[in-house]
């Protein structure tokens, strides 16, 4: 569970900084940050699912 | 809060350097208080979470993981004063493989450094007029 929490926290913190330095203007920043956050989560889940299937 | 009412004549390289050394200060110096505080606080939080969950800082001449260690060290160096204090005070310098989240912590520390470099570049760009 701690790994999942860390993944969410990582996505959140990176999304905040990307939102801060993005070029989207004042109103687009929050939307851009949320988009980055959701993309991180989506890619994280996709990779986790793929790696779970790989028979190491 | 994000106004240009006081034109900043500080050397852009100095702004970039200060922003690298103290996360968020480059933006604050240019009147971007919210950006500076939010970005700086986020980087600080990321760094401390990294230390808390068992991450460690790589040295530039560290060879524990071959040449990659130096690259990791460069990423960590991006944290500015946090990296320097950690190096000189000697905290978060040793690997803690007993903690299951130690590798996550090291990644948090590296990414905190990389994000701080992005913040410093952003502050530089604002100063030279490439960004508003």
Image (cartoon, coloured by chain):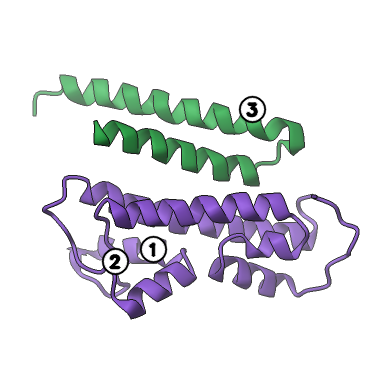
Chain colours: A green, B purple
Question: Rounded to the nearest whole Å, what is the CA distance between mark 3 and mark 1?
Answer: 29 Å
| Residue closer to the observer: B21 or B75 | B21
Residue A26 drawn above or below residue B38: above
Residue B97 at what x, y percent from top left? Answer: 13, 54
Q: Residue at x 55, y 41 (%)?
A: A16
Residue A46 at what x, y percent from top left? Answer: 33, 22
Question: Rounded to the nearest whole Å, what is the CA distance between mark 3 and mark 2?
Answer: 35 Å
Asked whether the residues under marks 3 and 1 belong to the same chain, the reply is no
Counting labels gives 3
Residue B58: name its quadrant. Answer: bottom left
Q: How crowded is mark 1: few (under 14 residues within 10 Å), some or many (20 or more)?
A: many
Quick check: can you spot residue B124? no
Asked whether the beta carbons under mark 3 and mark 1 sit within 8 Å of each other, the answer is no
Q: Which mark is residue B30?
A: none
Q: Which residue is drawn at 78% across and 59% down?
A: B31
Q: Residue A31 carries which label?
A: 3
Q: Is residue B69 left or right of residue B39?
A: left
Q: In this view, does A52 lie to the left or right of B5?
A: left
Residue B121 at what x, y percent from top left? Answer: 62, 59
Q: Pointer 1 indicates a residue of which chain?
A: B
Secondary structure of the residue carrying numbered label 1: helix
Query: Which residue is disc 2 drawn over?
Result: B58
The numbered mark, 2 or 1, whose residue comes first in the sequence reads 2
Residue B16 drawn above or below residue A10: below
Q: Residues within 10 Å of mark 2 (few under 14, many from 20)?
A: many
Secondary structure of the residue carrying numbered label 3: helix
Q: Is residue B127 left or right of residue B75?
A: right
Asked whether the beta carbons under mark 3 and mark 2 sit within 8 Å of each other, the answer is no
Asked whether the beta carbons under mark 2 and mark 1 sit within 8 Å of each other, the answer is yes
Q: Is residue B4 left or right of residue B52?
A: right
Query: Which residue is disc 1 drawn over?
Result: B76
């Amino acid at each position: 569970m701690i790994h999942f929490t860390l993944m969410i926290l990582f996505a959140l913190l990176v999304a905040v900084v990307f939102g801060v330095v993005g070029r989207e203007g004042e109103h687009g920043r929050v939307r851009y940050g949320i988009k980055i956050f959701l993309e991180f989560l989506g890619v994280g889940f996709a990779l986790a699912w793929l790696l779970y299937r790989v028979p190491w | 809060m994000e106004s240009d009412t006081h034109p900043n004549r500080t050397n852009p390289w100095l702004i970039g350097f200060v922003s690298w050394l103290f996360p968020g200060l480059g933006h604050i110096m240019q009147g971007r208080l919210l950006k500076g505080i939010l970005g700086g606080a986020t980087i600080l939080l990321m760094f401390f979470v990294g230390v808390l969950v068992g991450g460690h800082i790589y040295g530039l001449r560290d060879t524990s993981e071959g040449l990659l260690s130096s690259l990791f060290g460069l990423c960590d160096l991006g944290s500015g004063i946090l990296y320097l204090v950690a190096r000189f005070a000697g905290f978060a310098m040793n690997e803690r493989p007993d903690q299951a989240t130690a590798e996550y912590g090291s990644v948090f520390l590296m990414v905190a450094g990389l994000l701080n470099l992005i913040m410093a570049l952003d502050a530089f760009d604002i100063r030279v007029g490439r960004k508003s």
